[in-house]
Image (cartoon, rainbow, N blue to C red):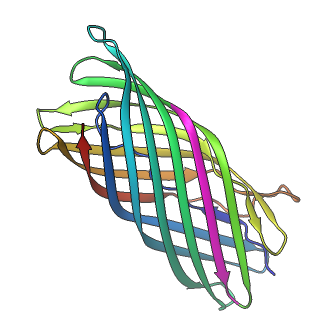
Amino acid sequence: MKKLFALLLLPSIAFAGKIGENYVGVELGTSNIDFTYAEAAGSVSTDGDGFSWAISGNYNLYNAGTENYGLDLGLSYFNTSADDTASDTGGTKWTTDTDLSVFSLILRPYYDLGSFKIFADLGLFNQDIEIDIKHSSTDKASGDSSEFLYGVGFELDLGEKFSIQPSVAWTESPNLIVASGSTLLGSDTVTFAIPVSYRYSKNIDITASYSSVSNDDFVHSTTKTTKANSEPTSTLAIGIDYKF
């Protein structure tokens, strides 16, 4: 069985709801999944788009009242799947079918300057990835890990209804275990997210979020040789938050 040498697959970790508010929300969208294989004999790249969904919640753990600082606790669960078919440089057709789920638990200390807030993200990020691979034979790659996540960002109110919340976060992707015997070491991951929130009513916000994820190269555990370059992937979603 040929070796799998690169995979880029990570979802949005954006919390679209506003800082300092208690809410539960749901988002529906689409995620792009890039799969790249490379060896001396040739290479193949598939690019699948799949349906994604997420549920999330935020609870304001601490608000200093007359002071400008506070602390939020955010929870989210994300799931997506996608498949794609492409031919490698030798003409063999490849089909990849990928499932991904992510659970995150994030503390968000923030400082409130009125219409402008700055924050940090600190938490845990659990990922479960499974990829079915079919070409001249079949194989499976999978990975499951819990990693530390940290990031920074700001929230800016654009009038009374709209707010935008750009952020950047760093974590690591899990090692991928290939059924035919290879192990691919997890790589550093950077996510840029841009959630937008629209205040529809006192208790309802309409949300949208876009994120772009890039990885360092995956490295074979035995040869320590990089076999392919990573490329960005993205998630685009819309949703609704109920505030309480």
Q: Tell me, yes or no, whether the highlighted magenta stretch contains residue 114.
A: no
Q: In which quadrant of the rendered image does the N terminus lie?
A: bottom right
Left or right of 142, for residue 189: left
On whether residue 125 falls in the magenta region, the answer is: yes
- The quadrant of the image that shows the C terminus is top left
Q: Main secondary structure of the magenta part?
A: strand
Q: Tell me the magenta residue range.
A: 122-135
Q: In which quarter of the image is residue 224?
A: bottom right
Image side of residue 45 versus residue 72, left or right: right
Determine whether 23 is above or below 139 in the image: above
Q: Is residue 58 left or right of residue 150?
A: left
Question: Could you say where residue 199 lies in the image, as x and y percent from the top left?
Answer: 15, 41
Q: Considering depth in this image, is 101 or 42 the residue closer to the camera?
A: 101
Q: In this view, does 65 lie to the left or right of 131?
A: left
The percent coordinates of residue 115 (x first, y second) are: 21, 24
Q: In this view, does 165 lie above or below 112?
A: below
- Residue at figure coordinates x 36%, y 24% from the top left: 118
Residue 189's spot in the image, x, y percent? 59, 47
**Residue lying furthest front:** 244
Instruction: Give the image quarter of residue 67.
Output: top left
Name the residue: 28% across, 11% down: 65
Judged from this view, the residue extending furthest toward the right is 222
Q: Is residue 63 above or below residue 231?
A: above
| Total numbered circles | 0
Q: In x, y percent, where is residue 229?
A: 64, 60
Q: Residue at x 33, y 61 (%)?
A: 28
In-front residue for pair 166/107: 107
What residue do we see at 11% from left, 33% from top?
160
Q: Would you identify the image quadrant in which residue 92 lies?
A: bottom right
